[in-house]
Amino acid sequence: MTDWEGWAPLPRPAGRTTVEVLRAPEPPAAPRDRRSPDVVLRPGGRAHVTFRLHAPEARAVALAASGWWQPQRPDVCDFAPRPDGWWQGTFDVPDDWEASYRFLVHDGGHDGRQDPGWWARGLRDPGAPGRTDPHNPHGHGAGRGLASSVLWLPGAGKRPWLAGFGDVSAVPPRLATRADEPRAWWWVPERPAGEPLPLLILLDGEAHAERLGTARVLADAAAAGALPPVAVVMVASGPDRARVLGVPGGVARWVGERLVPRLRREGVGGRRIEADPRRVVVAGSSFGGLSALFAAARFPDVVGAAVAQSPSLWRYPPGALVEPLARVAPRVRLRLQAGRYEGAAASEELARALVLRGADVSSQVVTGGHDWAWWVPRTVEATAALLA
């Protein structure tokens, strides 16, 4: 048996990993009403993406894209000034890039001569105010979320159900919870009650319900046929997120011991839940990705599938999860996903080790960073595949 209660998280590793950012030749200046970004597909699976910002007061402007926080050249994300207060930057990227981004604007400091703070501190802690993209809230698969603009290069025309990303007007009703349990919200398809539904549990539920508009995405995906009928429960992390997520206990234990059994008894939103554990999917990102794996490892008779995105595997010694997950391999399916710009090696290594132990596991590297921009759509797609 695994001594789950003895698993203490390790501290976050020190140091920063740099990333290569490639520039492309700048196209001619576009009319002021031209939507940004412009995307030009190139041979060999590449794309040239041009961003523009009107900032006549600026002394420097840069693109802060998820995962590009420490570029190998500190000024490689800087824009070039164009006429009439416009700034422009063009980047050579993979044509499946998915990222949230914002613009950084530097005014030169108190004497107008200081270097941009991001040259020394990186783009995540840039020392300059940031702006979302005012010219392109929805073009080229872009949406709004977490105070950033979002670009999905492969999503333009292929994921119409993502148009409502960041729209929290469709917040689902709150699932009634006991005082000693985490908050949760639920969403079910707007169809008459019928056969029992499979269950999707989304961790970090407050982000999905209050900031990302995931209920709107789910409804649009279901209407488009991209997601089968499924009951969704979004479980909040609360103020002690680092203590209750990414650990074998906390939310992972609550999901397996209390939430799923309760929902099987009571249903969700007036709908019954399927009894087959293979029809229960737990999905989470970052610390939540670890909790999804722990839920599957601890409760294979309750949770039959996990979608673990950018799981923070650094919290435990290398290979620590291999044996617990291999032990339940015949009963659970695991889908691991990680961003290319955040480092996907640990996720891929875990998948390879589990494949050798006979597990039903896959590993996917996404061209993005540690980012809701791809976590949300990839959760929908992975869940649809697991429930097909």
Image (cartoon, helix red, strand yellow):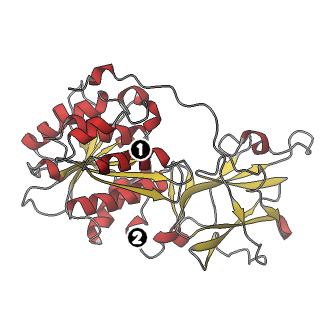
Q: Position of residue 359 (x, y in %)?
A: 25, 50
* Residue 387 left/right relative to 341: left
In this view, the residue in front, 50 or 337, is: 337
Asked whether, in this view, residue 108 is left or right of residue 215, the answer is right
Secondary element under disc 1, as helix, strand or loop, is: helix
Three-letter amino acid code of the residue under disc 2: Arg
Q: CA distance from mark 1 to mark 2?
A: 21 Å
| Residue sitting nearer the eye, 201 or 340 | 340
Q: Which residue is mark 1?
A: 207
Q: Which residue is mark 2?
A: 159
Q: Is residue 58 visible?
A: no
Kind of element beneath mark 2: loop
**Image quarter for residue 149?**
bottom right
Relative vertical location of residue 186 with respect to residue 78 in this rendering, above or below? above
**In the current view of this chain or complex, which residue is farthest to the front?**
356
Q: For the point 45% across and 76% down, which residue is it?
A: 157
Q: Tell me where residue 119 appears, x and y as whole percent.
A: 78, 45
Q: Where does the N terminus fall, quadrant-wise?
A: top left
In the image, 154 versus 37, the foreground residue is 154
Above or below, 189 against 113 in this view is below
